[in-house]
Image (cartoon, rainbow, N blue to C red):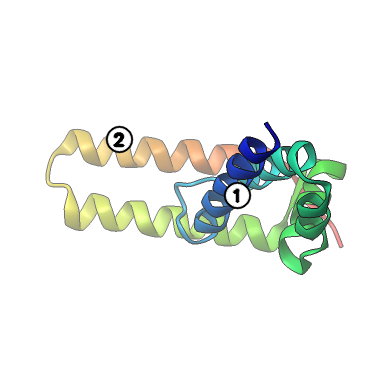
């Protein structure tokens, strides 16, 4: 079972890292899921993940305060809107797809902004 948890943790970690660069793929839930699976499968990998400068800080901050840093909010919302506007304007001629892109952008923005802003 430990090998299965390590596999799932590694998969979640990969998706979380990809989510840093793809605005429609959420980073935080995958990183938290990765930490959970590593905690159950391998304390060594769990400690390794939390000791990473960027990812560990991100996980600890979110778990402790349920807040997202202002910089991360700005980047996430900006990339979401840029990506979806590009898709709506240049890739999707159908009006219903443009409306879907707008709905997704609004939903993702609302979700990100619904969390407290981490100060400091």
User: In the figure, 4 relative to 50: above or below?
Assistant: above
Q: Residue shown at 63%/55% (left/top)?
A: 73
Residue 3 % position (x, y): 65, 40
Tell me the quadrant of the picture where the N terminus can be found: top right
Q: Which residue is mark 1?
A: 10
Label of residue 33 in the image: none
Q: In this image, 104 relative to 91: left or right?
A: right
As drawn, the residue found furthest toward the left would be 93
Of discs 2 and 1, which sits in the foreground? Answer: 1
Report the Cα–Cα distance between label 2 and label 1.
32 Å
Q: Residue shown at 54%/54% (left/top)?
A: 14
* Residue toward you, 41 or 46: 41
Residue 47 % position (x, y): 83, 55
Q: Which residue is mark 2?
A: 100
Q: Residue shown at 58%/37% (left/top)?
A: 111
Evaluate whether residue 14 shows in this view: yes
* Residue toward you, 106 or 33: 33
Residue 102 % position (x, y): 35, 41
* Residue toward you, 77 or 29: 29
User: In the figure, 24 relative to 37: above or below?
Assistant: below
Q: Secondary structure at mark 2?
A: helix
Question: What crowding class fits label 2: few (fewer than 14 Cα within 10 Å), some (14-19), or many (20 or more)?
Answer: few
Q: Secondary structure at mark 1?
A: helix
């Amino acid at each position: 079972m430990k090998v299965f948890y390590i596999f799932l943790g590694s998969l979640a970690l990969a998706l979380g890292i990809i989510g840093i660069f793809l605005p429609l793929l959420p980073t935080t839930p995958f990183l938290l899921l990765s930490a959970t699976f590593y905690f159950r499968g391998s304390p060594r990998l769990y400690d390794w993940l939390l000791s990473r400068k960027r990812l560990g800080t991100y996980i600890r901050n979110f778990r402790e305060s349920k807040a997202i840093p202002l910089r991360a909010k700005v980047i996430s919302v900006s990339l979401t809107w840029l990506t979806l506007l590009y898709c709506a304007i240049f890739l999707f001629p159908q009006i219903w797809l443009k409306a879907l892109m707008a709905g997704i952008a609004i939903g993702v923005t609302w979700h990100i902004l619904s969390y407290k802003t981490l100060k400091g």
